[in-house]
Amino acid sequence: MATALRFLIVDDFSTMRRIVRNLLKESGFADADEAEDGVAALNKLRNGRFDFVVTDINMPNMNGFELLKQIKADDKLKHLPVLMVTAEARKEDIVAAAQGGAAGYIVKPFTKATLEEKVLNILKKTGLAV
């Protein structure tokens, strides 16, 4: 089920970016770029074409919540679905992500099935996939 959607994977840990990228690729989403924090991600988002953002929450320079806020405040980016990824399953983080406009939330460690299911559900909800 290959699709031409372009993903941006944001995480300060390069191994985690590679894991997410490989899981997306196995799920048929081969077009992905990476950023090591929210500052780099925003720069790429504003200067490129992306359809979906998968971001960690805990990062230096600009964390995932700040990145989400910046994306949702930008008219050119606010349509992008943002999937938040974190190692902590704190209820207040999940609530903050939802209130901030995140399309979904997953807790590390997660499986290919979990990531694929979340991504597909978000794509259906946003009309990016059938």
Image (cartoon, helix red, strand yellow):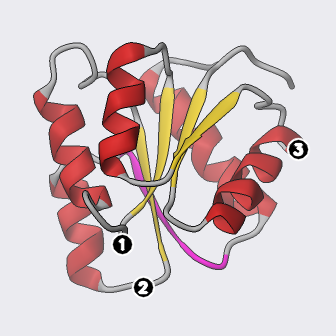
Q: Residues within 10 Å of mark 3 (few under 14, many from 20)?
A: some
- Depth check, mark 3 against mark 1: the one in front is 1
Whole-number angstrom distance, CA of label 3 to CA of label 1: 25 Å
Disc 3 marks a residue whose amino acid type is Glu
Q: Amino acid at mark 2?
A: Glu
Viewer-closest of 43 and 110: 43
Residue at which label 2 appears:
88
- Going from N to C along the chain, the mark reached first, 1 or 2, is 1
In the figure, residue 29 lies in which quadrant?
Answer: top right
Image position of 54 (left or right of 27): left
Does residue 36 show up magenta in the picture?
no
Q: Which residue is mark 3?
A: 26
Seen at 86% across and 25% down, the residue is 1
Considering only vertical position in the picture, is 56 above or below 66?
Answer: below
Segment colored magenta: 103-109
Q: Is residue 99 above or below residue 86?
A: above
Residue 38 in the image: state x and y as whole percent. 33, 49
Circle 1 residue: 58
